[in-house]
Amino acid sequence: MTPEEATDTVRAAINSVSNSRDSDGRHLIRYIGKLIETGAWRRYLEAGTGRLVTYAADESAKFARNPPGLGLGIDPDKLVAIIRAHRDQALADLVQDLLTPALGTVGRPSLENVRNTNIVSDRQDDATYVVGRLKRDDPNLAGQVRDGVISAHAAAIQAGIRHPYKSIRADNVDLAMRSLVRIYGEPAAVVALSRVSK
């Protein structure tokens, strides 16, 4: 598909997003499906300026978020929610997968994503990061999160991405010990206390 041909598809999708706020959103589903099927969102001409707009394969969320003309102008999660509300689960799953690419792309660090020698992620603690990790490491758990069977936090604990934490009162040693005994059992708490006391 040439950028000129892609422009019409992208323009129709942008209009369907803005019209979905006023109507029932059926046109949105049709045009988003066509947008994904043709790949028109990756290379098209901006309306009005005729400037070539390009996106890499992993920049679909950026395309969704960018203002109309440069993108759809809609939050990616809201886009998926609208599609799910119209009972098109197959398209919703496809869009969700496209908007949440698996993590672990190979490449060299750049000035934008590195401080010292650590690659920085703004989203390391949010559900998007967890789902991306799960899609790479445990696709079954990722599917359960997507389907709402399990929360992203519970799936992260189950996959070993996060560790479970319990709150224990710090103002009263008796209550703190009681909590430890309840969580780990008396024998384990006593053994641990004797190890730390040495």
Image: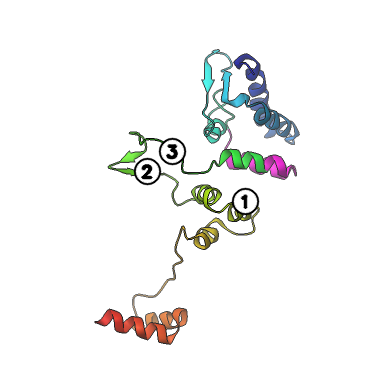
> Label 3 to label 1, Cα distance in Å?
25 Å
> Label 1 to label 2, Cα distance in Å?
25 Å
Q: Seen in the image, is 112 located left or right of residue 197? A: right
CB contact under 8 Å: marks 1 and 2: no
Name above or below for residue 2 compared with residue 125: above
Whole-percent x, y for residue 174 in the image: 36, 85
* Label located before the other in sequence (3 or 1): 3
**Observer-nearest of 35 and 105:** 105
* Label located before the other in sequence (1 or 2): 2
Most prominent secondary structure in the magenta stretch?
Answer: helix
Q: In the image, what residue type sits under mark 3? A: Val
Q: In the image, what residue type sits under mark 1? A: Arg
Name which residue lies at 42% across and 44% down: 122
Residue 114 falls in image quadrant: top left
**Observer-nearest of 79 and 95:** 95
What stretch of residues is rendered in magenta? 74-92
Mark 2 Cα shell of 10 Å, populated few (<14), some (14-19), many (≥20): few
Mark 1 Cα shell of 10 Å, populated few (<14), some (14-19), many (≥20): some
Name which residue lies at 66% across and 53% down: 147
Residue 84 falls in image quadrant: top right
Whole-percent x, y for residue 41 in the image: 60, 26
Report the residue marked by disc 1: 146
Whole-percent x, y for residue 172 in the image: 34, 80
Q: Name the quarter where the N terminus is drawn.
A: top right
Q: Seen in the image, is 144 located left or right of residue 188? A: right
Report the residue marked by disc 3: 106
Report the residue marked by disc 2: 120
* Label located before the other in sequence (3 or 2): 3
CB contact under 8 Å: marks 3 and 1: no
Mark 3 Cα shell of 10 Å, populated few (<14), some (14-19), many (≥20): few
Q: In the image, what residue type sits under mark 2? A: Val
SS of the residue under disc 3: loop
